[in-house]
Amino acid sequence: MKTGSKKSTRPLLIVIVGPTASGKSDLAVALAKKIHGEIISADSRQVYKGLDNGTGKITKREMKNVPHYLLDVANPKKQFTVVQYVTHATQALEKITSRGKTAIIVGGTGFYIQALVDGMILPDVPPNRKLRAKLQNKSAAVLYVMLQKLDVQRSKHIDPLNSRRLIRAIEIARALGKVPRLKKKPLPYDVRFIGLDVPPSRLKERIGIRLRKRLPTERNGLRNNMIEEVRRLHIKGLSWKRMEELGLEYRYLALYLQKKMTKEEMIEKLTIEIWRYAKRQLTWFRRDDRIMWIKEPFLKNTLGAILTR
């Protein structure tokens, strides 16, 4: 592949980022078909087996025979850490490039992407059982305020409703003074960052459309939907508490199925929280000046951006 500047001797690595429902997966597949690429997912919930409809996980049909990595690699009953992600993703990268293919990382979990691409030094802080026992009964709102006082930067890029992650961040901040942002040797690749720039009104519309498509109605008679997925997961042993920890769709569907809110309340609350999540994703990615933001048509503009850099 030619570029507009001096050709790099390092293998090309394309990273596609953006908020939820922006079209990252479709673009990655279309691009992979054009350049003989293979895809590595960077999504903190799509790593889990069985979390399909709720996470908007790409289907076999939508993959169009393009190999995908880091999907369905973990048991949802157990936490999958960023350290595990980096280990698995590094192995996938080596496998892809050893066969002369181009790796495409695609996803909305900025912390996963940064840890992998920039080689972040991740904190080796063992669990503090005494502290966890003290914090486990506190509300997410209280935990979030505690984290803000300890490490305001970390608080800007964390789900303020995820008690488990908040407790872990507090645990690390208490041990180290703050959650570190140190870096070590970056990946030995020629990395091109592409961000999908979707107008807010259009993104809100897409979020609403995608949510409605995954919920059953009398009109669509949808059997394979988010509600049934969560019901099946619970029957198979995934606790309500764990589903609430997994966040967003699983949190609110779990509350709905426990009759702690109505279906209408669940849909309204979920729509609001997905939009807030999308804005947090954008906040994370906008601070990275390596990202070239492109507007639709995404495939044409992505190819142009890659070829001219």
Image (spheres, grey):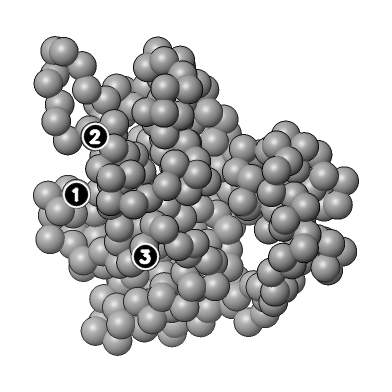
Q: On the rendered structure, is 165 left or right of 44? A: right
Disc 1 and disc 2 in contact, CB within 8 angstroms:
no
Residue labelled with disc 2: 228
- The residue tagged with tag 2: helix, strand or loop? helix
Q: On the rendered structure, is 32 left or right of 186? A: left
Residue labelled with disc 3: 74
**Mark 1 crowdedness (10 Å alpha carbons): few <14, some 14-19, many ≥20:** few
- The residue tagged with tag 3: helix, strand or loop? loop
Residue lying at 15% horizontally and 53% vertically, measured from the top left: 60
Residue labelled with disc 1: 59
Q: Looking at the picture, does residue 299 appear above or below residue 66?
A: above
First along the sequence among labels 3 and 2 = 3
Residue 122's image quarter? bottom right
Residue lying at 29% horizontally and 86% vertically, measured from the top left: 98
Distance from the alpha carbon under mark 1 to that under mark 2: 17 Å
Distance from the alpha carbon under mark 1 to that under mark 3: 17 Å
Residue 129 showing in the rendered view: yes
Image position, residue 207 (x, y; %): 39, 27
Q: Nearer the viewer, mark 1 or mark 2?
A: 2
* Amino acid type indicated by mark 2: Glu
- The residue tagged with tag 1: helix, strand or loop? loop
